[in-house]
Structure formats: C-alpha cells, structure tokens
Image (cartoon, rainbow, N blue to C red):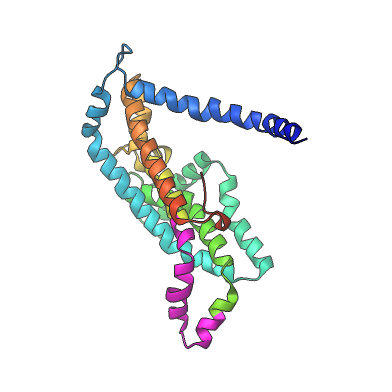
C-alpha cells in the first residue's frame, strides 16, 4: 500500500520535476557554461574578470533599487497597516484595488506612466508646466515604486493581520501610547513581513530593464539593460557572466529572507 502511494506521489510530482529541470536547472547550467567559456567554447575566467568594467552600472542599479525599495517601504507599511486594521469586507476591497493595476501588462503600465510624465503629457498639461521628468533617475524610481509597491504591501499585510489583536489591547492597557504600540509591538512582530517585502521589491528593481529603458529615455543604463544589450549584440559570454552575478545576488537575498521569515507568515519564496 505504501509502495503504491509512493508511486502515485512520484507520478504526480513528475510534471513539476520536468518543468523545473527544463526551465530552471537547464537554463542555469547554460548560463554557467557561457560565463566560464570564451567565444570558441574554451574554459576562461576572462568574462568574470571583465565584470570590473561594469562596476559603475552595478552601483547605479543598486542605488536606484535601494531608493525605490525604501520608498515602497515608507508608503507600503502604512497601507498594509490600514488594510489589516480595516473590517474584513473592506480588506477584500482594498486588496482588490491594490492588485488591480497588476492585472494590466507591465508594458502597458510603463507606457501609461510615460504618457503621464512625458514633457507634453498629462501631468505637465494639468499643472501647465514644462517639467522634464522622463529621462531622469526620478522617473525610473517612480516607475519601480509604481510597479513593485504591491510586492511590499502584501507580505507586510499578511504578517500584520496575523498579529493577535489582544496584544495591541494589552499594550494599550499597560500604558503604551499608539506610537509606542506601533514601535514596541507591531513593528517587531512584523519584521518578517518587512524583510519579505524588501526582498520582493529589491530583487526585481535591481534587475529591471524595461522600466529603465522607457522612463530613463536611454540617458543611462542599468544592469538589466546591460545584460539585454550583451545578448542582443551576440556577446553571450559576457552577458552570461553578468547574469551569473545577478543570480548569485538574488539567491543570497532569498536565503536571507528565508532565514529571517517563517513559513506560516507567507514570507517564504524558495
């Protein structure tokens, strides 16, 4: 009987295993192969050593992604707190409104932001000004915040909503003011949600390329743009080396998140 169940579980898991091998493990192997070989297929560290030339691009990508993540945290935590404190029926409405833009394709959302921020766009027409926003770092950061804000709100909301309300009331009964309840009770208990949200915003922000291309106006280049350019121009080995570094950074970020979050709080990704 146990053997039969074991066979059934293996059959049920087979599509998932096949999918993981075909679309996760195999691409990773290909990236590692190209990263450590030259154009003729010979083993080489040249691609890895050449990454020092892209240090300014890595630094700029990290700078913009950290700023965008910080802004998402400043905006997202109060939003998550308000949603968690709302009545259950209102929570569903707020979550739906939060996720509604995510139902639209990223390309369409980015073009919509361009239409709003462009020199002759909606914002300048509304304010009757001639602000030049598209083509600046601020526009790229705005695009990152707009596109990735739900990734910050949802894990924090999940974490805050699971905090026992009796703890809030007990802290108030013991003399804590609302600010103290927030700093001494809610914030410490929602740390795992914050870490999850920061990771889920930082990772796609640092590797994005379409947002920076359209809202950056080609005035500067982020690491995602560099990777795309390398593959488009046929420099597969250099592009694979940069991609390998990005994958390592992402795996480190995910391992940190998994280390400081609990599986029952919705923070685990891998």
Magenta residue span: 169-195
Does the magenta segment cover residue 217?
Answer: no
Whether residue 245 is situated above or below residue 139 in the rendered picture? above
x and y percentages locating residue 165 in the rendered image: 59, 75
Q: Nearer the viewer, residue 170 or 31?
A: 170
**Can residue 171 be seen in the rendering of this structure?**
yes
Seen at 46% across and 46% down, the residue is 115
Quarter of the image where one finds residue 55: top left
Seen at 33% across and 22% down, the residue is 237
Whether residue 222 is situated above or below residue 33 in the rendered picture? below
x and y percentages locating residue 260 in the rendered image: 44, 56
Please name the predominant secondary structure of the magenta segment in the image: helix
Q: Nearer the viewer, residue 113 or 209?
A: 209
Seen at 65% across and 67% down, the residue is 90
Q: Nearer the viewer, residue 160 or 235?
A: 160
x and y percentages locating residue 7 in the rendered image: 71, 30
Q: Residue furthest top?
A: 40
x and y percentages locating residue 264 in the rendered image: 58, 57
Does the magenta segment cover residue 178?
Answer: yes
Quarter of the image where one finds residue 169: bottom right
- On the picture, is 70 further left or further right than 169? left
- Quarter of the N terminus within the rendering: top right
């Amino acid at each position: 009987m146990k053997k039969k169940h074991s066979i059934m579980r293996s059959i049920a898991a087979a599509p998932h295993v096949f999918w993981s091998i075909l679309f996760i493990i195999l691409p990773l192997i290909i990236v590692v192969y190209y990263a450590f070989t030259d154009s003729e297929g010979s083993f080489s560290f040249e691609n890895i050593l050449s990454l020092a030339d892209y240090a300014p691009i890595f630094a700029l990508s990290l700078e913009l992604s950290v700023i965008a993540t910080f802004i998402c945290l400043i905006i997202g935590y109060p939003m998550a707190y308000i949603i968690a404190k709302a009545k259950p029926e209102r929570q569903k409405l707020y979550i739906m409104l939060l996720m509604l833009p995510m139902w639209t394709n990223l390309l369409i959302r980015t073009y919509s932001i361009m239409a709003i921020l462009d020199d002759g766009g909606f914002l300048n027409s509304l304010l009757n000004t001639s602000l030049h926003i598209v083509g600046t770092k601020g526009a790229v950061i705005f695009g990152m915040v707009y596109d990735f804000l739900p990734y910050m709100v949802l894990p924090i909301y999940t974490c805050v909503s699971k905090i026992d309300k009796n703890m809030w009331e007990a802290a108030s009964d013991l003399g804590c003011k609302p600010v103290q309840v927030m700093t001494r009770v809610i914030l410490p208990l929602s740390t795992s949600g914050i870490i999850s949200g920061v990771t889920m915003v930082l990772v796609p922000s640092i590797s994005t390329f379409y947002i920076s291309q359209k809202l950056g106006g080609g005035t500067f280049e982020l690491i995602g743009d560099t990777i795309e350019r390398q593959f488009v121009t046929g420099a597969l080995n250099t592009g694979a080396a940069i991609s390998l570094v990005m994958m390592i950074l992402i795996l480190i970020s995910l391992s940190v998140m998994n280390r400081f979050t609990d599986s029952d709080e919705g923070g685990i990704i891998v």
